[in-house]
Image (tube, grey):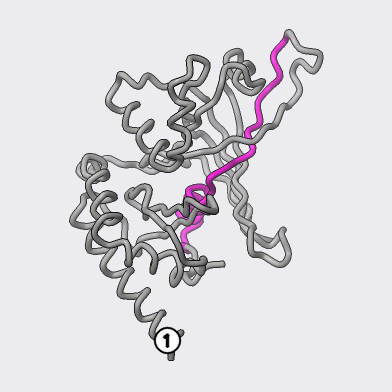
Amino acid sequence: MTGMPPPTDPLVLARHVVRGCHKASLAVTARPDTPEAGAAYASLVEVAFGHDGAPVLLISTLAEHTKNLLVDARCSLLFDGTAGHGETLTGPRVSVQGSAARLDPAKPADAALVARYLARFPQAEMYAGFADFSFWRVAPARAHLVAGFGRIVWFERFARDVVGCEALAAGEADVVAHMNADHSDAVELYATMLAGRAAGGWRMTGVDPEGFDLRQAASGDAVRIAFDTAVGDPEAARVELVRLVKRARATQADTAG
């Protein structure tokens, strides 16, 4: 359920659907030393995203999907955005094909992806330090959007170009901390008035050029709110956040009236 119309551009819509999911089905190829060698193997993973929309995973080397990725890095992730649709197949879903690679938290760019993951899933902090767990990034290749009957699109390039958005990436942690500490009322309004979620305990977990992410700790529910205009720095993000809270308050006033 959402109080905002989805993006109309198919590629932006696809990334909106993907970023709005906190879990996905991961499909890999079974490794040669297994009875099902060469067959598809699917599992469930929690997922965060880079500013470009590339999926980030925290997975264990004890898991079958990781053992398979270590042999063949090719994979596909299915993101299901059909919740709330009376007829499931009329809702949007996106398959992202790509290649997975382990992150090196010692590298600044990889450390930023790790930070985004842990901001989205703070409970994962306890696993992140285990020797058998590691963070992976899926470099997106092709993607397939099915947004209902007759709305089917293949994209040869899924990731967003983030050149020129470096200032936003550098200032993201400050924006998120400021919103959660000083504007928690606005964060609640985004979730309740713009996304139609139940009130209580919503926090911003990340902001990127196309929008921002919220999560409710008690329920684990995740919400994605799209910006009207893409942003590249904290000030532009502030302008969009102010515009959206005004919209949320107007919706609240209409509801009360």
Q: What residue type is labelled 1?
A: Asp
Quarter location, residue 214: bottom left
Q: Residue at x 43, y 91 (%)?
A: 257
Q: In this view, does 183 lie above or below 126?
A: below
Report the front residue among 220 and 247: 220
Q: Residue at x 22, y 63 (%)?
A: 239
- Percent coordinates x, y for residue 204 in the rendering: 36, 53
Q: Is residue 19 above or below residue 129?
A: below
The N terminus sits in image quarter: bottom right
Q: Name the residue under label 1.
A: 254
Residue 225 in magenta stretch? no
Q: Give the range drawn in magenta.
A: 7-32
Quarter location, residue 193: bottom left
Q: In the orientation shown, which residue stands out farthest toward the right?
A: 35
Q: Residue at x 38, y 31 (%)?
A: 114
Q: Is mark 1 on a helix, strand or loop?
A: helix
Q: Residue at x 30, y 21 (%)?
A: 107
- Percent coordinates x, y for residue 52 in the rendering: 38, 41
Q: How many marks can you see?
A: 1
Left or right: 244, with 235 as reference point: right
